[in-house]
Amino acid sequence: MRTSTEPKPKTNPLQTLELPVHGMDCAECVRHVEHALAKTPGVASVQVFLSAEKAILQVDPSVASIEQLRAAVAEAGYTVPEPAEEATTKAHAGYTRKVWTVLALVFGAVLFVVVIGEWLGLFEQITARVPFAIGAALVVLSGWPVFANVARAARRRQITSHTLMTLGVLAALAVGEWATAAVVVFFMRVGDYVERFTAEGARTALRDLTALTPKQARVVRDGVEQEIPVEAVRPGEIVVVRPGEQIPVDGVVVEGHATVDQATITGEPLPVEAEPGSRVFAATIARLGSLRIRTERVGADTTFGRVVRLVQEAESNRAEVQRFADRFSSYYLPIVVAIAALTFLIRRDPLAMAAVLVVACSCSIALATPVAMLAAIGRAAREGVLIKGGKYIEALARANVLLLDKTGTLTLGRPQIERVIPFNGVEPTEALRLAASAERDSEHPLAEAVRAHAARQGIRLSEPTRFEAIPGKGVIAEVEGHRVAVGSHRLLAAQDAALVASVKETQGSVLWVVCDGKPIAALVATDTLRPETPLAIQRLRELGVEQIELLTGDNPGAAAALAEPLGIPYRANLLPEDKIAVVRDYQRQGKVVVMVGDGVNDAPALAQADVGVAMGAAGADIALEAAHVALMREDWMLVPIIFAIARRTMRVVKMNLLLTAVYNVVGLALAAAGLLPPILAAAAQSIPDLFILGNSARLLKNDPARNSSRDSRR
């Protein structure tokens, strides 16, 4: 019997698991769930997302089971619903806002009654007639869910914001003030609803986005049209879309014509025409026509699916100000307990101690940043802008250097060959034929221009036998036994410097054609500046961007033709590594750098910048992954819009934090001095949450894109 001595291939046992988690209201909740899941055996990593109400885990399924994970979440005080329960929850989500609105009104009415009652001394007369045992029982029953969560957190040696209020309740009960304890519990529960309402406001834009995900598709199988779940569609299958229906997949139109509303992807209200050869995207709508589409991507792999996923996960890229708030909360709670203890030691007044504990709820500190960030990210997504996290909003708000690519960024990206300059006795038509044949497999806009120019002249191309793309230089191909290179002047030998000088001042992009080491032509291409760009540059200057500069691999003449009318400096003849070096040089000077490019050729520079912005990223995998901000449509007015959104968001965050800080300092001082009774402290502790809700909601209602679009069309 023979035994194999070959080592068995190592397999990765980890699997990605998405777990819905309900009951989270703030960043503190997220930390508790992450901590509970991370301790579960078999869990390698975990990320919890407040806006998406889910956890994404890397788990070893042979060690960690769903039941164990559900138990860990339950132990932390939250729930993992069954699929049927989750569907029911989503079905009733539309009613929650009305319920919370009513609760907010009730909160205001009760707050008014409490304040007047405390001022007139009516509470003591009413509550004195209720036996203490009954009052204490009412307190325990009404606050039991909160008390249970606090007890579970205490067993894990964790302090939550409710720990303070629970201590305040216990202190009030200890001195026989059951009415005070009841009011504290009441406002504790109302505060929970207010916090849920705040978090729900941040989730609204994401829910609206995910609700657009296609559910059904009509496919042609064995010559028969069938309606099936979209997840069952296979790449390569033909999907039929009728007038007014949602396109369920990413693919290419093979038959039919239609006007397609792509607002869900690009945010652009104007529809586009789809015909055979056009690319279309899932979650868009076909109007005024029907289409047959060859499927390329389905479900989460579609452009829309990737956008939804990236928006959901954006909150994991937390801004530094948010990290500060998280760290502050962890230190703040023990400090409050110490102040309460010191108050009792000095004043010997348990009610003053209870008031200190009650007034110092820290959820408002934890909510001040993430709610505003999520609101801004959700609003931007509606306008066709994908921002991958709060840290990029913060960087955009501080940015003072903006670097720009040329082709496809400042320009429309549809260059045309204006003229062919032949050398060494080669006919212009022959030089163009060799160049277009060499560029046959290239996706660069200039390559498309060369092929299009050859097609207009009726030139028949040859099939290259070898093709190589050289970043920053061009392409090299084998055409009919000749080594043909097409690209920048870097393809030329040193002795050809005179040729380069002869076309140096050409107002256009120059493509050199070299055959077997000998230059045979220069192709001059021109592109058109995007019409909205001058206004966008003006807006950026008004927003305080100090330095705007053009970086291009093109020649100085072509760069000057675009940069000088815009009044911006330029650097020409740059390789991709040169652009990275420029970004790093500014960063070494302490500048915050934003780079705007097409997301494909400029991917390294986009990744190096503090914020990389990809123009027209819809359908481009590299752009969606490499950039920190993806503009889903090619509209330069979106660039000042993202700067404006970022600056406004940071103003809202600072206002949230300032009010919370002032409130806590004043509230603690009044409570410690005995000037703020526990009842009023309990009523007042939800005020910062209400302010944060209203202040952050302004970001959801802001509509800068539409206003700017109107301005740009005047």
Image (cartoon, helix red, strand yellow):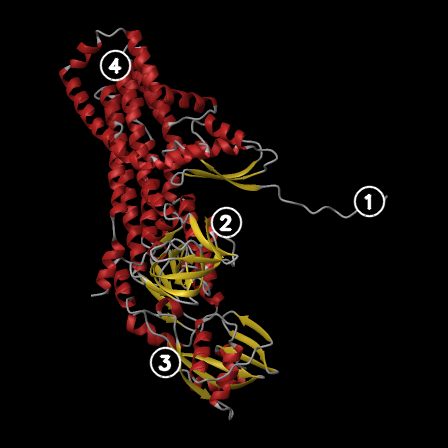
Counting residues from the start of the chain, the first of labels 1 and 4 encountered is 1
Relative to 77, 357 lies left or right: left
Residue 377, image x, y percentages: 34, 48
Dot 2 or dot 3: first in sequence order is 2
Q: Is mark 1 on a helix, strand or loop?
A: loop
**Marks 1 and 2, how far apart at CA:** 43 Å
Crowding near the residue tagged with mark 4, few <14, some 14–19, many ≥20 C-alpha atoms within 10 Å: many
Q: Residue 179 carries which label?
A: 4
Mark 1 Cα-neighbour bin, 10 Å: few <14, some 14–19, many ≥20: few
Query: Which is more toward the observer, 283 or 197?
Result: 283
Q: Distance between the residues labelled 3 and 4?
A: 82 Å
Would you place residue 428 above or below residue 478 in this image?
A: below
State how far apart marks 2 and 3 are (Cα).
53 Å
The image quarter containing residue 691 is: top left
In the depicted structure, whether residue 85 falls above or below residue 306: above
Q: Can you see residue 545?
A: no
Horizontal and vertical percent position of residue 337: 36, 23
* Residue 198: quadrant of the picture: top left
Secondary structure, mark 4, is: helix
Q: What residue type is labelled 2?
A: Ala
Residue 291, disc: none
For mark 3, what is the residue?
A: 507
Label of residue 3 in the image: 1
In this rendering, the label closer to the viewer, 1 or 4: 1
